[in-house]
Image (spheres, rainbow, N blue to C red):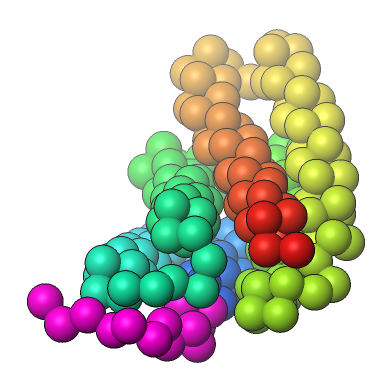
Amino acid sequence: MRFSFRPNEGAFYELFTRAAQNLVRGTELLNELSLPDVEVQSVSERLTEVEHDSDQITHDLYKKINSTFVTPFDREDIYRLGSLLDDVMDHLEAVGNLLYLYGLTKLPSLPREMHELVHVLDQQAKLTADAMPRLKSMKDLEDYWIEINRLENHGDQAYRMLLVRLFSGEYDALTVLKMKEVADELEAACDSFEHVANTVETIAVKES
C-alpha cells in the first residue's frame, strides 16, 4: 500500500462533507412521505441508493486513513466521525424502508409527532452539512453542537409524545408495533446526530 507522509487534508474534509450532504438528501426524501400521492416505494429505493453511496464514502474514508501516514487530526477521531455519520444514514434508510414495507403510509395520516421528528432530523442534517467544511479551520463550530443538542432534546420530547399517542388506543395493536419500530429508528437518528456533534466538539477541543 502506498503511504502519504504529507496528509492530503482536503480529502478527509471532502469525504466528511459528502457524507453529511447525503444526510440532507436522506431527510429530504423522508419529507416527501408527507406529500399527497407520494410513491413510497420510490422514496424507499432512493433512500437505499443514498445509503449505498454513504457506505462507499465511509469505505473510502477508511482507506484514506490507512494509507495516510500523518492525518490532519487523531485517526481514531476521524474513524469515529466517519462511522457515526454512516450510522445516521443507516437509521434514515431504515425509517423509509419500514414505512414502505409495513404499509404505514396507507393510513389516513401518519401521527403529527412522527412528522415533527422528521422535521427535527431535517434541521439536524442541514446543520451538520454546514458544519463539516468548518472542520478544516476548527472555527465557528460551538453554535453547531449546541443547536444539535437542543434539537435532540426537542426530538426526545416528540418521541415521548409519539409513544403516548401510540399507546392511547387510537391504533390497533399490530399498527402500534409497526409504528413503534419506526419511532425507535427516528429517535436513534436524532441521537446519532448528537453523537456526531459530540465527536466534533471533542475534536475541536483537542485541536484548540
| Residue 86 falls in image quadrant | bottom left
Residue furthest to the left in view is: 1
**At 71% across and 21% down in the image, what residue appears?**
163
In reply to whether residue 58 is colored magenta, the answer given is no
In reply to whether residue 10 is colored magenta, the answer given is yes
**At 22% across and 80% down in the image, what residue appears?**
3
- Pick the front one: 198 or 109: 198
Q: Report the quarter where the C terminus lies.
A: bottom right
Magenta segment, which residues? 1-15
**At 53% across and 66% down in the image, what residue appears?**
73
180 sits left or right of 135 in the view: left
Residue 28 at x, y percent in the picture: 62, 69
Residue 69 at x, y percent in the picture: 32, 73
Q: Is residue 187 above or below residue 35?
A: above
Q: Is residue 20 above or below residue 106?
A: below
**At 53% across and 13% down in the image, what residue appears?**
173
Q: Report the quarter where the N terminus lies.
A: bottom left
207 sits left or right of 182 in the view: right
Residue 89 visible here = no
Residue 183 visible here = yes
Residue 60 at x, y percent in the picture: 30, 73
Q: How many marks?
A: 0
Residue 110 at x, y percent in the picture: 67, 42
9 sits left or right of 6 in the view: right
- Pick the front one: 108 or 140: 140
Q: Is residue 68 above or below residue 160?
A: below
- Pick the front one: 75 or 124: 75
